[in-house]
Amino acid sequence: DADVTQTPRNRITKTGKRIMLECSQTKGHDRMYWYRQDPGLGLRLIYYSFDVKDINKGEISDGYSVSRQAQAKFSLSLESAIPNQTALYFCATSDFGGPGNTIYFGEGSWLTVV
Amino acid sequence: RKEVEQDPGPFNVPEGATVAFNCTYSNSASQSFFWYRQDCRKEPKLLMSVYSSGNEDGRFTAQLNRASQYISLLIRDSKLSDSATYLCAPYSNSGGYQKVTFGTGTKLQVIP
């Protein structure tokens, strides 16, 4: 089983619908992240959380919200999905900050907004 | 200028060849560097970390040039299984704000 699990893995949704992507991890890491990946644009950070009470916006947070329900769970919501939010979304974790900050990614969630 | 720039490729090389990619970064305060490998439609996975001038792990060598602000990844004796996209990711800590910034990746295709 993957250490970082994302659900759903694939979703097609309509414009204007609310959708939630869920992430859970068994690595025991405090830090969790949500990225989106688009062709030619690479991985961009949406939100990150250093612990349950610490949530921060990344570089592209508009149109997204997150919830850190527990140390192991970090969900991403699109309140009103739009087509340009069609992308591959990754949840990720890391165990500490600092120069040795290895990031571990989930398997990704493909989201298509039509 | 992008914070991290990589040639998107693809680099098409025959099996057994040596290939090198460069990654340039704009933040001179970057403290460490990571190379991630990403297979098609899969998640990125850490390949190598670089904290000083370079690192070597088997067929893979990373070299850092801080003066010119680039890091390279050298793959010797390329295997078919090396076909993937390689992402460069510098780490920086500016005023307590820690950040890992990913490049868009370089695609490698190893040909039989």
Image: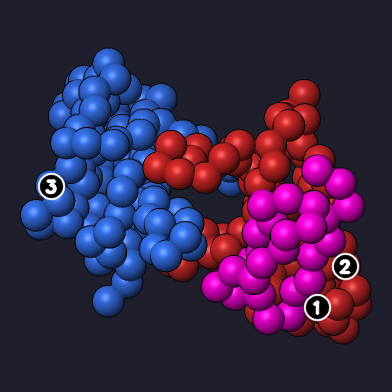
Q: What is the number of the mark on residue A81?
A: 1
Dot 2 amino acid type:
Ile
Of all chains, the one bearing label 2 is A
Are callouts 1 and 2 both on one chain? yes
Quadrant of image for the N terminus of chain B? bottom left
Choose between A46 and B95: the one closer to the eye: B95
Are callouts 2 and 3 both on one chain? no
Q: Which SS does the magenta portion mostly show?
A: strand
Chain A shade: red
Q: Residues within 10 Å of mark 1 (few under 14, many from 20)?
A: many
Q: Position of residue B75 (x, y in %)?
A: 23, 29
Q: What is the number of the mark on residue B66?
A: none
Q: What is the number of the mark on residue B65?
A: 3
Q: Position of residue B64 (x, y in %)?
A: 18, 42
Give left or right: position of A13 versus B2: right
| Range covered by the magenta-colored residues | A46-71
The residue sitting at 57% across, 40% down in the picture is A96
Dot 3 amino acid type:
Asn
Q: Residues within 10 Å of mark 3 (few under 14, many from 20)?
A: few
Chain B shade: blue
As displayed, is residue A52 above or below residue A80?
Answer: above
Q: Is residue A42 magenta?
A: no
Q: Is residue A59 magenta?
A: yes
As displayed, is residue B62 above or below residue A42?
Answer: above
Q: Which residue is mark 2?
A: A19
Q: Position of residue A39 (x, y in %)?
A: 49, 64
As displayed, is residue A55 above or below residue A109?
Answer: below
The residue sitting at 42% across, 65% down in the picture is B95
